Every structure is written in C-alpha cells, then in structure tokens.
Image (cartoon, rainbow, N blue to C red):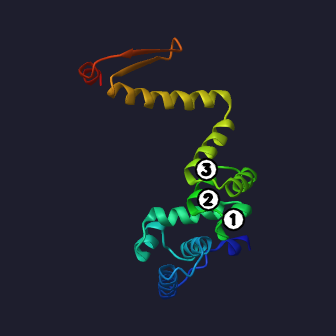
Amino acid sequence: MTDEIHKKVQLSPIQVDRLVQELRTKTTQHQLSILAEAKCYAEIMRLSDYTQVALAHELGKSQATIANKVRLLKLGQPAKTALEEGLITERHARALLKLDKRTQANVVKKIIQQNLTVKVTEMLVKKLCYNQLDLPAQQAVVQDYLTVGIEKFKKQGIYLDYHASKNQITLKFISREEAERKT
C-alpha cells in the first residue's frame, strides 16, 4: 500500500503541453504571483518527466530562473507572505533562503521596518550566517577571504604573503613591474 502512495502520478504529454501553454500565457500576461508561478513549475515537474532545463526551454526561460523560483517555495511562511504582499522583492526572498525560518521572519521584519535594500539584506544575511559558524569555520572563512584578497592586491603592487605555519602576514609595497613578475 505504501508503494501506491508514493507512486508518481504522470500526466499525458498532451496534458503537460496544455499546462505548459497555460503557464506560458499566464506568466506572459503577469497573471500569477511569484510563488504561484513557482508552485506551477514544481507541480509540472512533479507530474511529468520535465526537468528544470526542459521546462525552461519550453517556457523560453533560463534553467536558473526556474530553479530560483522553485527555491522560493522553501521560504518560511512570514517571508512568503511578505513576498506575496509585495513587502519584499524576489531578490530579498532569495537572500533569506540561507537562513532558518525563525531568523528569516526576524530579517523580514527588519527589511520592512528599515526599508532595507537587497544589497544591505544580503550583507545582513551573510553576517548572520557567519555568526552561526563555530570558531574553526569562521577562521576558515576569513582565511579563504584573505587568500582571494591577497591575489587581488598582488596585481596592484601590494604584495601580501600569508604564512599559515607562522600565522603571519607580510605586507610589501612593490613596483608594478615586480608585481607582474610575481603573479
């Protein structure tokens, strides 16, 4: 009996084509909310053999667009409600996906109360995610950040060298020619 419950209901190719056509029409005419559109994408993929790539091709959208919309279905209810009511944008909502649902709700309140931009929201989410890491993980994030930053500095004639074994950073200002030789 449990096998019957987990069986995938398949739509016929004609039914899928009708659904895709209807979805194409409604999205073109902006008749669906962001989350309603996402639910339609997810439902068509669930009821058919369509992948994100195939569905995107049929709708004239990118696979990333389909993936990003479907990911919004993972938001907590306060974030979904704020998105549906137009209190936050789709980009705000995508930034919130990195947070647990309780933290999402708190950040949604902050976005609305302080009228936060997407960029500020992304920085806030990044900070909250970083603060949730344990000390070794925080140190690894900082080390990765420094490694990338050091490479950028080298190209500008600022030579930074990180010695992990000594836990030490050396800073030298060098000519552009010397910087180009070192990189």
Q: Label 2 sits on what residue type?
A: Ala
Q: Are marks 3 and 1 in contact (CB under 8 Å)?
A: no
Q: Residue at x 57, y 74 (%)?
A: 37
Q: Position of residue 178 (x, y in %)?
A: 26, 18
Q: Nearer the viewer, residue 51 or 181?
A: 181
Q: Nearer the viewer, residue 43 or 181?
A: 181
Residue ID for mark 3: 121
Measured Cα–Cα span from mark 3 to mark 2:
10 Å
* Mark 3 closeness class: few <14, some 14–19, many ≥20 residues within 10 Å: many
Residue ID for mark 1: 82
Q: Secondary structure at mark 1?
A: helix
Q: Position of residue 158 (x, y in %)?
A: 37, 21
Q: Which mark is residue 93?
A: 2
Asked where in the image residue 9 lies, by quadrant, the reply is bottom right
Q: Position of residue 42 (x, y in %)?
A: 58, 71
Q: Which mark is residue 92?
A: none
Asked where in the image residue 74 lies, by quadrant, the reply is bottom right
Asked where in the image residue 155 lies, by quadrant, the reply is top left
Q: Label 1 sits on what residue type?
A: Ala
